[in-house]
Image (tube, rainbow, N blue to C red):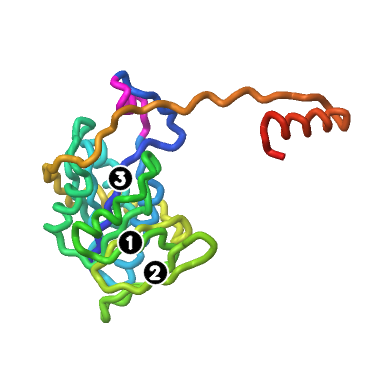
């Protein structure tokens, strides 16, 4: 069973974000990058399916040269090879198109994504790729069952107020959610093996993006807290403020 995992390298959630001088991008000078946490669930699920059914796991990433480090980490987790579509911060093309065109050149039975990336929280990439490749798509998946013999799958997905069960033919695109599994930590053997696994680097297919970033700005600073008093004597004033200023009661 051949599985593709589309992985994104994102700023660490502990990074203090600064807006660049152009007002349209992030200052990358002091940013630490990691594998998108939701993509780690996709990598782990792909490796588990490979261990169960055989086949290969290929990591596909669009990004600069530094993204190779996290592709190697995914290989240390158990992926077999990587494809890096080289694109720096100046890349203005359609990311979904570039990924879809790269995927078309590969053999696959299943394509896995994290349900969203934590940098822009768009949550659209699995659906866009599925549309471009004319494949079924299920996102926010918490349980995944694959039957290679019948070339079908069943996904349990989280919806507001409950769970939805979807059946689909293979190949398909899946967006993984926290709770699907517990991603493994690479061991020394995996790290050493990852250094020798094949990595293909190539230019991405370019198509003009359908959207443009006009501006970025940080949220306004949070207002300072207010202490209204101590003990039971402060309760009337607290109730008044909650009613008249906060409009909460």
Q: Residue at x 26, y 54 (%)?
A: 128
Is label 3 in contact with label 2 (beta carbons under 8 Å)? Answer: no
Quarter where residue 69 is shown: top left
228 or 171: which is nearer to us? Answer: 228
Q: Residue at x 23, y 31 (%)?
A: 89
Mark 1: which secondary structure?
strand
Q: Residues within 10 Å of mark 2 (few under 14, many from 20)?
A: many
Disc number for residue 8: 3
Label located before the other in sequence (1 or 3): 3
Residue receiving disc 2: 155
Residue receiving disc 1: 174
Give the label, 3 or 2, closer to the camera.
Answer: 2
CA–CA distance in space, label 1 to label 2: 9 Å
The residues colored magenta run 22-32
17 or 86: which is nearer to us? Answer: 17
Is label 1 in contact with label 2 (beta carbons under 8 Å)? Answer: yes
**Is residue 187 visible to us here?**
no
Mark 3: which secondary structure?
loop
Q: Residue at x 40, y 47 (%)?
A: 37
């Amino acid at each position: 069973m051949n599985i593709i995992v589309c992985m994104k390298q994102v700023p660490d959630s502990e990074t203090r974000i600064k807006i660049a001088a152009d007002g349209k991008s992030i200052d990358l000078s002091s940013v630490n990058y990691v594998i998108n946490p939701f993509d780690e669930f996709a990598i782990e699920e792909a490796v588990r399916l490979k261990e169960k059914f055989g086949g290969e796991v290929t990591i596909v990433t669009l990004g600069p040269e530094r993204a190779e480090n996290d592709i190697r980490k995914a290989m240390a987790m158990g992926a077999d090879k990587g494809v890096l579509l080289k694109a720096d911060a100046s890349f203005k093309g359609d990311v979904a198109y570039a990924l879809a065109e790269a995927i078309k050149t590969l053999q696959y039975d299943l394509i896995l994504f994290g349900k969203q990336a934590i940098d822009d929280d768009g949550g659209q990439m699995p659906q866009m790729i599925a549309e471009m490749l004319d494949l079924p798509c299920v996102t926010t998946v918490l349980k995944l069952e694959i039957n290679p013999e019948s070339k079908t799958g069943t996904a349990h997905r989280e919806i507001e107020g409950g769970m939805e069960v979807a059946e689909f033919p293979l190949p398909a695109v899946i967006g993984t959610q926290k709770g699907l599994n517990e991603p493994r930590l690479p061991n020394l053997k995996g790290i050493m093996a990852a250094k020798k696994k094949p990595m293909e680097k190539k230019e991405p297919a370019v198509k003009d993006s359908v959207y443009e970033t006009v501006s970025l700005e940080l949220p306004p600073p949070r207002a300072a807290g207010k202490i209204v008093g101590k003990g039971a004597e402060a309760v009337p004033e607290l109730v008044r403020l909650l009613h008249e200023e906060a409009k909460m009661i």
